[in-house]
Amino acid sequence: MTIKPRTYFVRTYGCQMNERDSETIAGIFSARGMKPADSMDTADIVMVNTCTVRDKAEQKVFGLLGKLRELKEKRPDMLLGICGCMPQQQQVAKRIRSRFPFMDIIIGTHNLQQLDTYLEQVLMERKQILEVWEERQQQELYAPARRSAGLKAFVNINWGCNNFCTYCIVPFVRGREKSRSQADIIAEIEGLVNEGYREVTLLGQNVNSYGKDLPDKPDFAELLAAVNQIGGLWRIRFMTSHPRDVSARLIDAIAGLDKVCKHLHLPIQAGSDRILAEMNRGYTQEHYLLLVEQIRAKVPDIALTTDIIVGFPGETEADFAETMAVLRQVEFDSAFTFMYSPRKGTPAAGMEAQVETAVKRERLQKLIALQNEISLKRNRALIGQTVNVLFEDKTEAMFKGRTEGNKLVFAASANNLLGKQAQVTITEAKTWNLVGQVMDGND
Ligand code: 5AD
Ligand code: SF4
């Protein structure tokens, strides 16, 4: 039998969904009495939670596995595991096993809840585990999470995606949409509030399709209304929304529910209708712009953020110019911008007219430069305004917090603002953050 691990280290790549899964990993290990290690170098077990959405993320993981090889040579008793979206692809799981045969546990996204059982098997039988299930099983079996202490927590509301955008690997590695029951979600959030959390981010690949697969078909707006009633909770965030599925009811919920932050992350991906159709996004530029108009009419101070891909196969200079034009027209508060990365098994990877890397890079730089200008402009418009900030951190003399729009604010105060909300008047604006003054009587 292998020595029982006493400490663990989890390295996470990718999105909030993965961050949340890593809390489950930490929860499973904690339930065994294990403690977090300060670094990989000292941990008895290292778990690598992977992302496969772009090639860059995968390359980082392969680099880390190389380092872990050296660690394991020095400390053969340590255990190593890899999970998440990379090994969920059978061919990648097998490749990991042949290139990195020293890995003890190789499992997919749907197997995570069984991690304790796998670890037990490794310890008892000293065998390598490679398990990749095709679908999430035992929906209600939901291992406890070990969240980092703080004010903010991620809460899963639905998993998977049915959209099959032609560039995206997510539907293949996260499976079909499955919603958690409203009762489960509410109970988890009530528990979190009792522990002192004040803000929740409801997570799903497409939160707007929440409930479609549940017996009484509650919709996302209804869920928001129910979460809004939880006493002691201050703020509700959610991501991600698909533009095709944003309903009038959702817009009303953002406008009308006091705890729902006035922020919408609404990935547009591209400006050109031809590219949007090739991407299988299910909306046109016109539809998206109309949606933005409707949202701003009801929630004028809403922060809008987005995701954009440049260099999708066949994207011409004219198509790209449309993306730039939409950016200018909408004036997003910020944007996550990506170069298209072909993912094996997705339709777009097989499309002809792949765009050269140099062209993609040039377009990305132009896009980022434009968005930075816009972000600064949007932030400057806040100067003189008073906004609600939830303070969660401190660096030197400044307290750090976020606005409802998720903008970072620094503010000095003689009082301890940590864990508190305050009304803050914005005095200075940069591209990435704001500086403000706490209003009298609030701090
Ligand atoms: N290449 C580049 N970006 C991608 N995204 C998803 N798949 C790819 C891909 N193959 C981006 C989308 C999505 C975000 C999470 O990642 O913009 O909204
Ligand atoms: Fe991927 Fe599209 Fe689903 Fe988002 S909506 S996870 S981009 S397939």
Image (cartoon, rainbow, N blue to C red):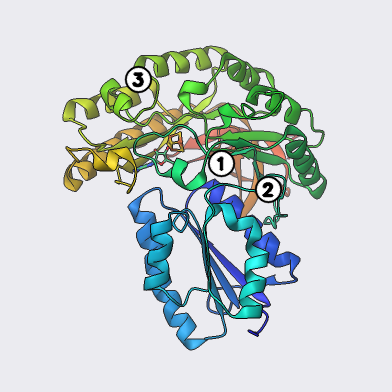
Single out the mark in the foreground, 1 or 2: 2
Residue 59 vs residue 87, the one in the foreground? 87
The mark that comes first in sequence, 3 or 2, is 2
Q: Sort mark 1 into few (<14), some (14-19) or many (20+) by Cα contacts within 10 Å.
A: many
Q: Secondary structure at mark 3?
A: helix
Image coordinates for residue 352, horizontal then vertical, percent = 18, 38
Query: In screen coordinates, is 415 left or right of 101?
Result: right
Q: Sort mark 3 into few (<14), some (14-19) or many (20+) by Cα contacts within 10 Å.
A: few
Q: Which mark is residue 173?
A: none
Single out the mark in the foreground, 3 or 2: 2
Residue drawn at the location 59% of the way across and 56% of the way down: 111
Query: In the rendered image, which quarter contains the C terminus?
Result: top right
| Residue 416 makes an appearance in the image | yes
Dot 1 amino acid type: Val
Report how far apart the C-alphas of labels 3 and 2 lie in the structure: 46 Å
The mark that comes first in sequence, 1 or 2, is 2
Residue 48 vs residue 438, the one in the foreground? 48
The mark that comes first in sequence, 1 or 3, is 3
Dot 2 amino acid type: Gln
Q: Secondary structure at mark 1?
A: strand
Instruction: From this view, report whether residue 78 is shown above or below residue 356.
Output: below
Report how far apart the C-alphas of labels 1 and 2 lie in the structure: 42 Å
Q: Secondary structure at mark 2?
A: loop
Residue 184 vs residue 176, the one in the foreground? 176
Residue located beneath label 1 in the image: 409
Image coordinates for residue 93, horizontal then vertical, percent = 43, 62
Quarter location, residue 204 = top right
Residue located beneath label 2 in the image: 138
Query: In screen coordinates, is 58 left or right of 229?
Result: left
Residue located beneath label 3 in the image: 329
